[in-house]
Image: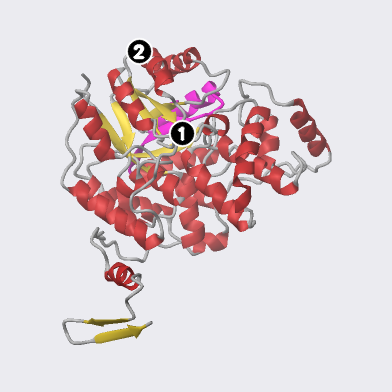
């Protein structure tokens, strides 16, 4: 049986999937300090959507955030994500910005990069993989899984075989962002990818939306996968990744060797549960729910909560089921792409526009126009003729804006200038809040006790006296 190592996703994909990237650096640091003593393959900390969100909403400097996490985890390999042709938003990014992002991450000690392209533009992926390797980083090209009529086991295995031949590649990353990889498919898919990787290490990253991810991890380990991605406690399961503690139990029961969690894991779990309560989230983490519609829409973990937030802004929460059905149709119209960043956001945004305007493709998102024109690559399936026609009509009626030059000379400045206004950049600062370890108690609180007593119909008067003599009385 294989020796298994873990990539921790608590601070990146875990909080992206369950908390919408709203975890503050001061809330991350107590976790990071305790993760440092654990034997991880890597710790994922960097995704530009989250860094930009912190900058725009909380005026937190992304570089100070990464420096703080790096200082808290000097013994860990830190990882970031990049698409083959873009970062941070849903359109192609100028190459100068893409390269500046890689350089700046490395300067801030984030040296491992998983690189994805959901439309499988392998030449574009190869160019970025080789660039990362030349800059001294460790590229990890990604197989992004989707259940479609076109993405067969052979397709994925052939992609892994080509990726494994690229300079600098020592491992291949496999992600099921939508949580729709069934155990039956896993039994054929994962061995095919492991064989295609030709001896290079294979990582497996499965979201647990439907409760399938945890089972697929055991299947993957049996098939030769040596690195699995997990999250912790309140930031695990459901739309997130399988829970670390439970994954270790499952693997050991299946006969695989994996190091035991350190005692610090309990402190992390307590801190995350307390932070969840503080911010209005579930301290128990995500709850897997088997919903067969997932095989139609294939929304990745973090997208569902984002779309719910958007519907609330339009006071249209009651239309969520309608939106889910529309996403499934738009995905077909756009050629059955694998649903992961940025295409999942493009599909979801267009579906939302369709239901709010009342007619499909009356209003087209700019990102959809770019997609149909091939700006993200080409999907394996055909794009619906009526969508192509609407794009052609819209483009014919528009004045094409002149691209603006990318400003800045230093790498980190280039990236911030691309995404933030001068005013937003001037407001950036480190998180001023103290990084304090929180503790979550499972004991009933005083409020809970009072509520339980007051619920009895025969109780008409309640008095509470503290040890120092202060009292409070209430009558019904």
For marks 1 and 2, give the CA distance.
24 Å
Q: Is residue 242 above or below residue 219?
A: below
Residue at 57% of width from left, 58% of height from top?
421
Q: Quadrant of residue 399?
A: top right
Q: Is residue 20 left or right of residue 252?
A: right
SS for dot 1: loop
The residue identified by callout 2 is 198
Q: Which residues are magenta?
A: 109-135
Image marks 1 and 2: residues in contact by CB distance under 8 Å: no
- Which one is in front, 240 or 369? 240
Q: Quadrant of the N terminus?
A: top left
Q: Is residue 409 visible?
A: no
Residue at 24% of width from left, 58% of height from top?
442
- Which one is in front, 8 or 42? 8
Q: Is residue 462 above or below residue 181?
A: below
Q: Nearer the viewer, mark 1 or mark 2?
A: 1
């Amino acid at each position: 049986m294989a020796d298994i190592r873990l990539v921790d996703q608590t601070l990146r994909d875990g909080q992206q999937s369950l908390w919408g990237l709203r975890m503050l650096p001061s809330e991350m640091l107590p976790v990071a300090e305790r993760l440092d003593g654990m034997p991880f393959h890597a710790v994922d900390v960097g995704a530009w959507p989250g860094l930009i969100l912190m900058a725009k909403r909380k005026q937190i400097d992304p570089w100070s955030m990464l420096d703080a996490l790096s200082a808290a985890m000097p013994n860990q390999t830190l990882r970031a994500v990049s698409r083959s042709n873009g970062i941070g938003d849903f359109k192609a990014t100028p190459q100068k910005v893409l390269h500046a992002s890689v350089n700046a991450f490395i300067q801030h000690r984030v040296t491992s990069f998983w690189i994805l392209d959901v439309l499988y533009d392998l030449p574009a992926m190869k160019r970025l993989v080789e660039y990362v390797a030349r800059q001294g980083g460790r590229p990890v090209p990604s197989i992004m899984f989707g259940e479609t009529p076109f993405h067969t086991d052979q397709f994925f295995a052939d992609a892994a075989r080509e990726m494994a031949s690229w300079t600098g590649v020592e491992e291949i990353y496999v992600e099921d962002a939508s949580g729709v990889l069934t155990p039956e498919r896993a039994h054929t898919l994962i061995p095919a990818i492991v064989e295609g990787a030709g001896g290079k290490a294979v990582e497996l990253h499965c979201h647990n939306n439907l409760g399938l991810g945890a089972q697929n991890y055991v299947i993957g380990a049996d098939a030769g996968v040596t690195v699995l991605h997990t999250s912790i406690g309140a930031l695990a399961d459901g739309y997130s990744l399988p829970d670390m503690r439970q994954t270790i139990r499952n693997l050991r029961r299946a006969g695989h060797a994996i190091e035991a969690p350190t005692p610090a894991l309990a402190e992390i779990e307590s801190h995350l549960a307390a932070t969840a309560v503080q911010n209005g989230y579930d301290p128990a983490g995500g709850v897997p729910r088997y919903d067969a519609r997932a095989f139609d829409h294939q929304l990745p973990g973090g997208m569902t909560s984002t779309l719910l937030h958007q519907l609330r802004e339009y006071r249209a929460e009651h239309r969520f089921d309608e939106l889910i059905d529309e996403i499934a149709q738009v995905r077909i119209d756009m050629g059955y792409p694998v649903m992961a960043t940025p295409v999942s956001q493009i599909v979801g945004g267009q579906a939302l526009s369709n239901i709010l305007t009342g007619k499909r493709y009356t209003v087209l998102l700019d990102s959809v126009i770019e997609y149909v024109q091939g700006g993200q690559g080409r999907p394996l399936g055909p794009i619906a003729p009526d969508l192509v026609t609407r794009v052609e009509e819209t483009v014919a009626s528009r004045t094409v804006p002149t691209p603006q030059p990318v400003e800045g000379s230093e790498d980190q400045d280039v990236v911030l200038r691309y995404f933030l206004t001068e005013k937003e950049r001037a407001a950036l600062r480190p998180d001023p809040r103290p990084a304090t370890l929180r503790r979550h108690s499972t004991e009933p609180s005083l409020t809970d006790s009072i509520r339980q007593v007051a619920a009895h119909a025969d109780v008409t008067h309640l008095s509470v006296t503290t040890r120092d003599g202060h009292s409070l009385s209430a009558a019904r």
